[in-house]
Image: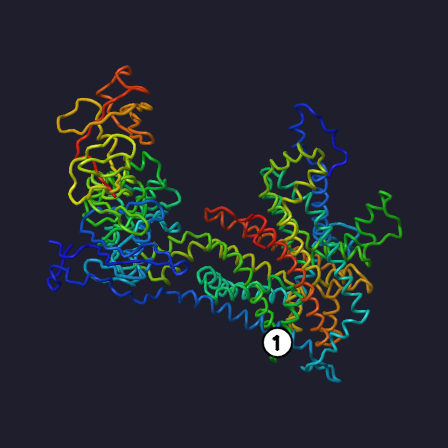
Amino acid sequence: MPAHPAVRLDHVGKQYDRTGAFAVRDLELDITPGEFFSLLGPSGCGKTTLLRMIGGFVDPTEGSVLLDGEDVTGLPPNKRNVNTVFQSYALFDHLSLADNVAFGLKRKGVARAEIRERVGAMLDLVQLGHLADRKPATLSGGQRQRVALARALVNRPQVLLLDEPLAALDLALRRRMQVELKQIQREIGITFVFVTHDQDEALTMSDRVAVMNQGRIEQCGTPEDVYERPTSTFTASFMGTSNLVPGTYRAGAVHLDEGPALPVGPRAGLADGTRVNLSIRPEKIWLSDFEPDMAQTTGTVRETVYSGPTTTYLIDLAPGITVSVLEQNTVRSRREDRWSGGEQVDLAWKPEHCLVLD
Amino acid sequence: MATTDDRPAIPDTRPSTPAPSKPVRRDTRLWTWLLLPGTLWMTGFLVASLVLVATLAFGTTDPLGNPRFGLNTDNFAALAEPAYRTVLLRSLGYALITCVICLAIAYPVAYAIALRGGRFKNLLIAAIVIPFFANYLVRMYGWSVVLSDDGPLLKALRALGIADAGTRILQTGPGVIAGLVYGFVVFMIIPLYAAMERMDTSLIEAGRDLYGGPLRTFFFVTVPATRQGAAAGCVLVFLPAMGDFVSAQLMGGPDQIMIGNLIQDKFFQGQNWPLGSALTMLLMAVLFLGLLGYLRRARQDEAEAVR
Amino acid sequence: MTGKTAPARRTPARRRAATRRPRFAIAVTVLFFALLYLPVGVVVLFSFNARKSLTVFDGASLRWYRAFFRDDLLLDSLGMSLQVSFVAMAGSLLLGVALALGLVRNRGRLGSLAGLVMLVPLITPEIVTGVAAMLLFKGTGIPLSTTTVMLAEITFSISYVTVILRSRIAALNPETEEAAMDLGATRRQALRLVTLPALLPSILASAVLIFALVFDDFVLAYFTTGVDPQPLSVRIYSAIRFGVQPTINAVGTLMLAGSIALIALALAIPRLFGRRGGLDLLSGE
């Protein structure tokens, strides 16, 4: 039973000397041993700075960093039992793959025979055993990525830090590496802290995701939490597409400024008259086969976008308020079954799929 | 993750107020240690020696010709004498003419290589640079043989009827300038070539459309686009040309001596080190002014580029 | 530039006209190459001359090469020049590589000061550096000798090494050094195990370049050398001031061959390591 979090960030902050701006601000976070944890956010949100603080490349200007209960704030990277997979991979071009992977073990003074064994096993794990004597320059992008991973993992770090490791790969390869990375992580059980700006990647791979914005964590939870139950407008809009409809909350419904009231069910702790954003995912709005407990309204189809397995409808609810609705093409598989521009449609949703955000 | 028993099972007893930030020391001492030896060496030898030159320029010589430190401006007053002024002006003139001739050579050569060199570009540039690495004296000596009264160049010119039996190149001002050009033209070609490589060739095509003739295109398009390379080249040529004394010695006569020859003379034959130092300071001052002009110009260009 | 090109045609030929051969520029280039190599060719050709003439070639012979190899004074000079070049190369590499690393990484006041000092030799004509070095040695009572030439050449060469390597270091991926530290290396180990090996091709290339530059240098050596032995280029200087010296043709040819070999080597080194961009060594001037 894990007594300490693998990583604890205790009110850490990083303020830059020059501008006085904060890259990370008063941030608290515990990462559980063995989990695949993602830091997700747009560029400049502070996620890489946070990762570099854990790695020891950036010193926080306030707060402390704890690894397995031990305060490592101010310790250089070589004194921390964490390893990093860099965005550029940062392979050592003058060394063979085997020597690249052996680099960390040699620094630790591990016995020669053990080094050979562990390096061999690790290269096999990433399916590069047959290329052990090659130089990195001769490898493809995906292979280089695997070497970087092997070079870090062979040291059996407490925590593995990954800084957008898949960003340089093409889409197909990225998808494959996502699965592979997740498999490796499950196999060896090391805590992964994964930085990415790609929400699909974070949702696919992580046990937990922290959504970051402007140096703070907006929301932290399972992929389902952050996707289904965003607690802020930022998270809702950053995680996939979301309809954000501004209005005023009154008596279990969000009243649009010009247009209908949209029932959302009673919300505890929300005073009548509060300005809110109603958030609902496009795939959570139904256009037919309504169930009795659903909230219902009508709108006018503005545009229909067909894209293979799904169709997206853009529907005007009120002047200036357009929502998008995503429907699987199983319901209305023929073209003439679908609505087209100008037609009136009924929309409905379950109140629990509706989020009311400040 | 294995945990040891002596640690508290629940670590949440720590205060929730922000921990006081610790003084963090990034290890930059290594970089300082790397900087120090080289910097100290350069300061100890170069800076100290230049300061010594500046100081000695205010010194005097005793009756035996030994240098004495002092604080008088006689040496600088002596520089105002017509004889010295003539040499200084001549050196300036030679160096400037050298720059202009180098420009006139380097523009077509860089243009031809950058735009027409194709896959031989690198080879051609290497072919220009390699002789430059040959010994300067051997090159100048070879050049003086070529330019000599019965050397191949004058023979050819005589055969073509351009020169007559009395035409000389050696022992004349043009001869000295020819030496300087031969010595330093590479310094003009390389930056100009680099500038032309960066230049967008479609500019020239557009220029042809706009201005028509190749000559107009050259002056309205190519020259402005490569102005910075030309300016850098001029500095790189002017600097060594101003300080040269070999060319004047091999190609010129007594009436073609340059400031470098005067300095050499004061330190070797003449044995008047304070006066030599003053001459050196004068040379430095001229070059410094030139460099300052270049830097101001470069900064203006940069500011324009930003805008 | 061309006064005699075809009259500007309107129609489809117009586009081709825009990129037609710059005949004038090509003519100047051909002439330039001819004049660039003519003096070198003369030296090489007459080094094989059987007669003591620089105008009439009278049959091939190795007589001047034999003369050179029998001339103890010249051989001593050659030995000294090689010695000076080697020491200056080693010394300036040691100081220059460290200085370049420090300059790129230390962004403080010391760094910018060092950067300024480093530039001084590059914007000072050699005659000034030479005079200054000579005065420094004389002023401090150090007799001019092989050692003083070495000291002066080291000082001068540091700037070249630093300029060449500085841009190389700045172009390195900073994450590589971080990766080494991440894997347990100290800053110093990261430097030794990762950064220096990555710089090795550039270091070797600049070593060769410095060797060639110092070996061929004349002005600085002229001001800082003692009477005996004197560096080869100073010896050549004394010889050519007094007219025809066929032995100098032979020495010059040998030096030329050596320089070309060294420069070719410097250009080839990055390629030997499987990396591109040998030529920018030269444009780093």
The vertical placement of B206 against B80, above or below, is: above
Local crowd at mark 1 within 10 Å, few (<14), some, or many (≥20)? some
Residue A145 position, x and y percent, is 32, 44
Q: Amino acid at mark 1?
A: Phe
Q: Is residue A182 left or right of residue C28?
A: left
Q: Nearer the viewer, residue B43 or C116?
A: C116
Residue B64 position, x and y percent, is 74, 84
The vertical placement of C3 against B307, above or below, is: above
Helix, strand, or loop for circle 1? Answer: helix
Q: Nearer the viewer, residue C220 or A185?
A: A185
Q: Is residue C254 visible?
A: no
Quadrant of the frame with the N terminus of chain B = bottom left
Q: Residue C75 is drawn in which quadrant?
A: bottom right
The subunit carrying tag 1 is: C
Residue sticking out furthest to the top? A336
Q: How is the image coloured?
A: rainbow
Q: Which residue is mark 1?
A: C137
Residue sticking out furthest to the bottom? B63
Q: Nearer the viewer, residue A110 or C7?
A: C7
Q: Residue A266 is drawn in which quadrant?
A: top left
Q: Is residue C199 left or right of residue C236?
A: left
Residue at x 25% of width, y 46% of height: A38
Q: Is residue B77 visible?
A: yes
Q: Is residue C146 left or right of residue A235?
A: right
Residue C145 position, x and y percent, is 61, 74
Residue at x 62% of width, y 57% of height: B296
The vertical placement of A9 against A358, above or below, is: below
Query: Number of labelled discs?
Result: 1
Residue A187 position, x and y percent, is 18, 44
